[in-house]
Image (cartoon, rainbow, N blue to C red):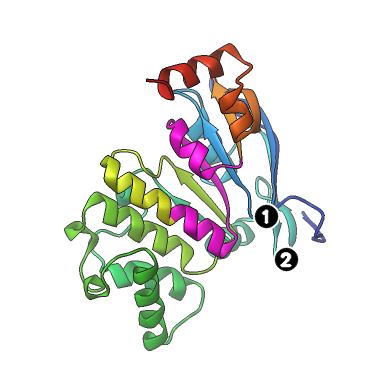
């Protein structure tokens, strides 16, 4: 189903998304809107359902019920019922996903330039010189030495692999990026550099982002709004600073007191 796009509609509208595994709840009844240029954080402890939700709205997991309306360049579509070719085209051209483990988002035995260029070629660019120039440009943007363009990700540190995964996703100019724990497992200094990079790219490219994390400090730095999840449900939502500075739900209060305070 396709509806004519408008400047006055959200980029993403999630309606009553639920995912069940038999009698177990992955997530239930989640609703939110995401507007162009906005970053939404989804927070909660392990098992809260945040990654299940992210997988449902990013097209990697079929929800049990609900709708995910996306305002694509060709009109608004429900990603849950869109034909597979249309869905794959939108995911390849207008969306990107950065995984917690870079190995899930990279081809580890293909060169850094090949990883970036692969997405360009999937979108129709065939001129080798242009592909390589764009790959070099994006290596520079994510602060990887251009001399590493022919090296494989297996020779990169974890932080470099994550930056390469970001370059691979952003090279085609997507409008919406999904991120699952983008700084998890990285040293504190590496995390700081990666967060600074993400913040600058969001601003420079006017990106919209849905980011899952257990780290409230990351959420405060990057997210405009956040959703707090517990047991597969959204227990609190609002502007990031408002929720973190004045949490209303007992679970959010516990998260804030245990993570943000010494």
Q: Choose top left, top right, bottom left or bottom right for residue 65.
A: top right
Magenta region includes residue 248: no
* Front-most of residues 240 and 212: 240
Classify mark 2: residues with Cα within 10 Å, few (<14), some (14-19) or many (20+).
Answer: few
Magenta region includes residue 202: yes
Instruction: Write the residue at 30% across / 50% down.
Output: 103
Q: Residue 222 appears at what percent x and percent y?
A: 51, 45
Say which quadrant the N terminus sits in: bottom right
Mark 2 lies on residue: 74
* Front-most of residues 173 and 188: 188
Mark 1 lies on residue: 36
Name the secondary structure under disc 1.
loop
Specify whether 150 is left or right of 77: left
Above/below status of 256 relative to 167? above
Q: Residue furthest top?
A: 250
Specify whether 83 is left or right of 128: right
* Front-most of residues 63 and 127: 127
Q: Residue 27 appears at what percent x and percent y?
A: 57, 26
Q: Residue 86 appears at what percent x and percent y?
A: 64, 61
Specify whether 78 is left or right of 133: right
Instruction: Write the residue at 49% across / 23% down.
Output: 48
Say which quadrant the C terminus sits in: top left
> Is residue 23 among the parts visible in the rendering?
no
> Is residue 143 among the parts visible in the rendering?
yes
Instruction: Write the residue at 45% across / 73% down.
Output: 120
Above/below status of 223 relative to 120? above
Specify whether 162 is left or right of 4: left
Classify mark 1: residues with Cα within 10 Å, few (<14), some (14-19) or many (20+).
Answer: some
**Region of the chain picked out in magenta, as a range:** 198-224
């Amino acid at each position: 189903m396709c509806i004519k796009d408008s400047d006055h509609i959200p980029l993403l509208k999630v309606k009553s998304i639920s995912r069940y595994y038999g009698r177990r709840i992955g997530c239930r009844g989640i609703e939110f809107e995401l507007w162009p240029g906005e970053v939404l954080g989804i927070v909660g402890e392990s098992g809260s359902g945040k990654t299940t939700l992210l997988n449902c709205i990013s097209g990697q997991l079929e929800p049990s019920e609900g709708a995910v309306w996306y305002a694509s360049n060709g009109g608004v579509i429900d990603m849950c019922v869109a034909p597979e070719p249309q869905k794959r085209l939108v995911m390849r051209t207008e969306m990107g996903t950065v995984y917690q483990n870079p190995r899930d988002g990279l081809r580890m035995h293909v060169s850094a330039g090949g990883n970036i260029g692969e997405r360009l070629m999937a979108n129709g660019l065939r001129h080798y010189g242009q592909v390589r120039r764009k790959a070099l440009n994006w290596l520079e943007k994510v602060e990887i030495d251009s001399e590493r363009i022919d090296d494989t990700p297996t020779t990169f540190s974890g932080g470099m692999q994550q930056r390469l995964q970001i370059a691979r996703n952003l090279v085609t100019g997507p409008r919406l990026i999904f991120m699952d724990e983008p700084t998890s497992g990285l040293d504190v200094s590496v995390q700081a550099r990666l967060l600074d990079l993400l913040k600058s790219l969001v601003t420079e490219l006017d990106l919209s982002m849905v980011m899952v994390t257990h780290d409230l400090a990351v959420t405060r730095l990057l997210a405009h709004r956040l959703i707090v999840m517990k047991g597969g449900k959204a227990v609190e939502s609002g502007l990031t600073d408002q929720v973190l500075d004045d949490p209303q739900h007992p679970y959010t209060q516990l998260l804030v007191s245990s993570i943000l305070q010494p």
